[in-house]
């Protein structure tokens, strides 16, 4: 009887977990679709429509990304919607951004004279004061990752030590994942409005290593699951999947610019067959990313408007090159 009860309990837990993961995936799909809609309005110069799209999803969503909150705050400021600004500003509380950092965000200076700004800072300071062992843990992982890499000699002197630390760091991260404690922005916080997190550099180095060392297992399914749970931005995940070089075609990590004598070239993109394009868009849909052609529009907007203040989840690589390589790329690759 006891064995039967244990089995029933185990089955119940697995069913609850499956339902929970399905709900998280459904939620994140809805969230990303709404954000893509808001960003399309942004690219078209439709500020009021973009703000409405951001406002609706951010206030109903169970979780968000700071870059999206940032964009909504900019839009509310530009449109003179102070009440909307302060409603959305509450979503920043608990993200781990210091009052000094937030006060230094120039576009928001216009709100500093409003009494609600100080009330927000007080709330944010209280949130920062809360003891958060998980955030302390992931910050230590970042510190450990960087400590010997930044010392004189770096890999050439401390290569074995760096490799040892990297193995410990990834074991800790995988333990967090296994126990459902991997921190998205809500639990892990961010270090800036771009959504940078302390674990980013650790995962970047590990995924990079898996393409160089066949003994290091790739973590594709783990990263994808974290995206579905709303804990990783899709294009951040896509960058790491590309570093693993595991054959998963997503297209977005194949956007390059050349730096020749300090001047940055136009962006180049890889050419795909119709079949490859279909595979890429199916894979992108799996990660709740926009189709590749829509993504290209966002990247082109960011490149063509270097001084625009909005933040988008885009990835592109700048490669140091010479005039001969630039000429060769102009002959062989397509420009964005």
Image (cartoon, grey):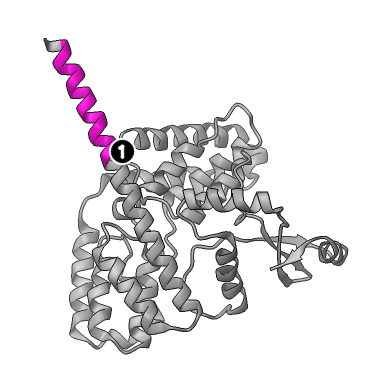
Q: Position of residue 298 (x, y in %)?
A: 55, 70
* Residue 93 falls left or right of residue 153: left
User: 201 or 2, which is in the foreground?
Assistant: 2
User: Considering only vertical position in the picture, is 217 above or below 181?
Assistant: above
Instruction: Tell me how many marks there are.
Output: 1
Query: Residue 52 location in percent, x, y?
Result: 32, 77
The structure residue drawn at horizontal position 50% and vertical position 77%, both measured from the top left corner, is: 43
At 14% from the left and 17% from the top, the residue drawn is: 5
Residue ID for mark 1: 180
Picture quadrant of residue 70: bottom left
Residue drawn where x is 59% and y is 43% of the image: 248
Helix, strand or loop at mark 1: loop
Residue furthest left in the image: 1
* Residue at figure coordinates x 18%, y 21% from the top left: 8
Tell me the crowding category of disc 1: few under 14, some 14 to 19, or many 20 or more residues within 10 angstroms, Cα based.
few
Q: Quadrant of residue 21?
A: top left
Q: Nearer the viewer, residue 162 or 89?
A: 89
Q: Is residue 281 above or below residue 54?
A: above
Left or right of 315, for residue 327: right
Please state, as top left, top right, bottom left or bottom right, where the C terminus lies in the image: bottom right
Q: Quadrant of the N terminus?
A: top left
Where is residue 81 drawn, in percent x and y? 28, 86
Q: Is residue 196 magenta?
A: no
**Can residue 193 be seen by looking at this rendering?**
no
Query: Can the viewer see residue 187?
Result: yes
Q: Position of residue 193 (x, y in %)?
A: 41, 67
* Main secondary structure type of the part rendered in magenta: helix
Q: Quadrant of residue 169?
A: top left
Question: Along the horizontal axis of the image, is 129 left or right of 209?
Answer: left
Q: In the displayed structure, does residue 141 sit left or right of residue 155?
A: left
Q: 105 and 71: which one is in front?
A: 71
The span shown in magenta is 3-19
């Amino acid at each position: 009887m006891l064995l039967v009860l244990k089995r029933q309990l185990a089955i119940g837990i697995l069913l609850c977990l499956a339902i929970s993961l399905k709900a998280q995936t459904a939620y994140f799909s809805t969230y990303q679709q709404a954000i893509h809609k808001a960003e399309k309005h942004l690219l078209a110069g439709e500020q009021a429509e973009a703000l409405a799209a951001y406002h609706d999803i951010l206030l109903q969503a169970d979780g968000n990304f700071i870059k999206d909150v940032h964009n909504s705050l900019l839009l509310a400021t530009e449109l003179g919607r102070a009440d909307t600004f302060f409603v959305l500003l509450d979503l920043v509380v608990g993200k781990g951004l210091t009052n000094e950092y937030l006060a230094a965000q120039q576009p928001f200076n216009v709100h500093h004279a409003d009494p609600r700004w100080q009330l927000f800072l007080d709330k944010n300071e209280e949130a920062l004061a809360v003891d958060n062992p998980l955030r302390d843990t992931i910050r230590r992982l970042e510190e450990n990752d960087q400590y010997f890499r930044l010392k004189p000699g770096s890999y050439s002197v401390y290569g074995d030590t760096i490799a040892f630390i990297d193995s410990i760091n990834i074991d800790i991260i995988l333990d967090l994942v296994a126990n459902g404690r991997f921190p998205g922005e809500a639990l892990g916080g961010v270090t800036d409005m771009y959504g940078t997190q302390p674990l980013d550099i650790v995962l970047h180095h590990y995924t990079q290593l898996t393409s160089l060392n066949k003994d290091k297992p790739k973590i594709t399914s783990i990263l994808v699951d974290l995206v579905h749970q709303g804990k990783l931005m899709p294009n951040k995940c896509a960058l790491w999947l590309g570093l693993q070089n595991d054959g998963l075609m997503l297209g977005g990590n194949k956007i390059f610019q050349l730096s020749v004598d300090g001047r940055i070239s136009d962006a180049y993109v890889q050419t795909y067959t119709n079949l490859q394009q279909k595979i890429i868009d199916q894979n992108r849909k799996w990660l709740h990313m926009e189709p590749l052609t829509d993504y290209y529009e966002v990247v082109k907007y960011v490149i063509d408007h270097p001084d625009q203040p909005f933040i988008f989840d885009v990835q592109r690589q700048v490669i140091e090159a010479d005039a001969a390589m630039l000429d060769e790329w102009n002959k062989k690759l397509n420009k964005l």
